[in-house]
Amino acid sequence: ELRDCIKGEDAIAALPDEDCWLFYCEYPPEDEPMARPITAAQAAELARSKEGDWYLVDKEFSWTFAHTHEEQCGPYFCRR
């Protein structure tokens, strides 16, 4: 609650249709780097997942989509 943002299904709907970067917060899946570029289609699919702590950002870091492992928290979307 420290920053205004869009939450839940509205956050998923607000995710821009553009390629972006995926960052894992702690432990990436085996054989994956902590950060990597992904396509817009991959981002849309990942946004609906129920696992992990990760976030997406665009190349200019003008928006962030944050996903937590807690079902009652998020996901969250905000713009700079």
Image (tube, grey):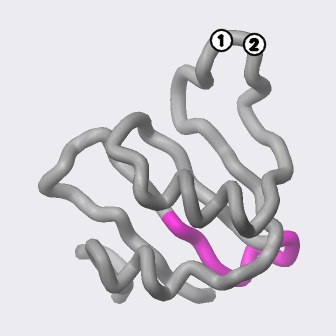
**Which residue is denoted by mark 1 in the rendering?**
30
Name the residue located 33 percent from the left edge and 85 percent from the top edge: 10
Q: Is residue 64 magenta?
A: yes
Circle 1/circle 2 CB separation < 8 Å: yes
Q: Is residue 45 magenta?
A: no
Name the residue located 49 percent from the left edge and 87 percent from the top edge: 14
Residue type at mark 2? Asp
As drawn, is 33 to the left or to the right of 26?
A: right
Q: Secondary structure at mark 2?
A: loop
* Farthest residue, direction top: 30
Residues in magenta, as a range: 59-65
Q: Quadrant of the C terminus?
A: bottom right
Name the residue located 67 percent from the left edge and 45 percent from the top edge: 23
Q: Position of residue 51 (x, y in %)?
A: 37, 37
Up-down: is 70 above or below 67? above
Residue type at mark 1? Glu
Q: Secondary structure at mark 1?
A: loop
**Which residue is denoted by mark 2 in the rendering?**
31
Q: CA distance from mark 1 to mark 2?
A: 4 Å
Q: Quadrant of the N terminus?
A: bottom left
Give residue 32's quadrant in the image.
top right
Q: Nearer the viewer, residue 35 or 46?
A: 46
Give the crowd class for mark 1: few <14, some 14-19, many >=20 residues within 10 Å.
few
Q: Position of residue 22 (x, y in %)?
A: 70, 50
How many numbered discs?
A: 2
Q: Position of residue 63 (x, y in %)?
A: 64, 79
Up-down: is 67 above or below 60? above
Up-down: is 51 above or below 71? above
